[in-house]
């Protein structure tokens, strides 16, 4: 069964450093998402992406964040200058169409020291 | 704005007992509704979803959920809980038009005792 994959599973970085989180969505899906979950809190939407552009973003997704689909398979989330409060589990998801089920990857745990 | 309320933060049930996890949503029209499960250190796995039609939906692992429009609820049930069901359960809602993101509840942690 096709699945969303994410790398790395765990990333540790120093405050102020740039990180890139990688995702490979399900191959025929057209809509891509990033969510995050701070420890002990609920899952929060960051950004959605369709047709090579951002279609919606939350207030969390400020200028420090960016997304890219550099090729036909990868979907990345970049944090330019990490802050302590960026420590969280980051989930990538994809769906075939906008209102269809979103399938989630296993997540990348980001720890900012 | 859409919102999801899961009133129970933590529930403990005995193995073999029945389970009901509550979920209430706020949305102007009929949304699409989901239940996801997250085992410790794992990602989010879809248990079941409701888009339209029969208001009682069946999912994986023996779970079911019932959509009640009059109560704005989408409660998750299982007749007999197994120890492997211990996990965090999230109810989520998405609008039925346009590219809108999932809105999650805060989750309910299920513990299963012998």
Image (cartoon, helix red, strand yellow):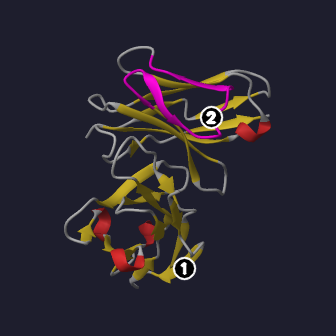
Give the chain of mark 2. Answer: A
Tell me residue B13's x, y (percent).
49, 82
Query: Which quadrant does the N terminus of chain A fall into?
Result: top left
Observer able to see residue B27: yes
Q: Which residue is mark 1?
A: B12
Give the structural element (helix, strand or loop) at label 1: strand
Give the chain of mark 1. Answer: B
* Residue found at x 44% / y 40%: A105
**Rendering quarter of residue A62:** top right
Q: CA distance from mark 1 to mark 2?
A: 36 Å
Give the structural element (helix, strand or loop) at label 2: loop
**B16, A76: nearer the viewer:** A76
Residues in magenta, as a range: A49-69
Residue B14 left/right relative to A111? left
Q: Which residue is mark 2?
A: A61
**A61, A70: nearer the viewer:** A61
Query: Which quadrant does the C terminus of chain A fall into?
Result: top right
Tell me residue B104's x, y (percent).
51, 57
- Residue A34 magenta-drawn? no
Tell me residue A22's x, y (percent).
51, 26
**Rendering quarter of residue A13:** top right
* Residue found at x 67% / y 52%: A39
Tell me the tag on residue B45: none
Observer able to see residue B114: no
Both labels 1 and 2 in a single chain: no
Residue A7, relative to residue B65: is it above or below? above
* Residue found at x 36% / y 79%: B70
**Rendering quarter of residue B84:** bottom left
- Label 2: few (<14), some or many (≥20) within 10 Å? some
**B100, B87: nearer the viewer:** B100
Q: Nearer the viewer, mark 1 or mark 2?
A: 2
Residue A11 left/right relative to B47? right
């Amino acid at each position: 069964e096709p699945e969303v994959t994410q790398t790395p599973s765990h990333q540790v970085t120093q405050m102020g450093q740039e990180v890139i989180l990688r995702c490979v969505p399900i191959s025929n899906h057209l809509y891509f998402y990033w969510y995050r979950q701070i420890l002990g809190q609920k899952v929060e939407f960051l950004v959605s992406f369709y047709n090579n552009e951002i279609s919606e973003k939350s207030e969390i997704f400020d200028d420090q964040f960016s997304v890219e689909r550099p090729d036909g398979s990868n979907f990345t989330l970049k944090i330019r200058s990490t802050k302590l409060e960026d420590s969280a589990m980051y989930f990538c998801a994809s769906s075939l169409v906008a209102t269809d089920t979103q399938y989630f990857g296993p997540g990348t745990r980001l720890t900012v020291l | 704005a859409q919102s999801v309320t899961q009133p129970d933060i933590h529930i403990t049930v005995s193995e073999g007992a029945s389970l009901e996890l509550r979920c209430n949503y706020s949305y102007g029209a009929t949304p699409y509704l989901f239940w996801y499960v997250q085992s410790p250190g794992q990602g989010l796995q879809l248990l079941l979803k409701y888009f339209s039609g029969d208001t009682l939906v069946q999912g994986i692992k023996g779970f079911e959920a019932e959509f009640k429009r009059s109560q704005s609820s989408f409660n998750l049930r299982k007749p007999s809980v197994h120890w492997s069901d211990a996990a965090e359960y999230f109810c989520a809602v998405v609008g039925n038009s346009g590219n809108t993101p999932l809105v999650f509840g805060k989750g309910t942690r299920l513990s299963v005792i012998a």
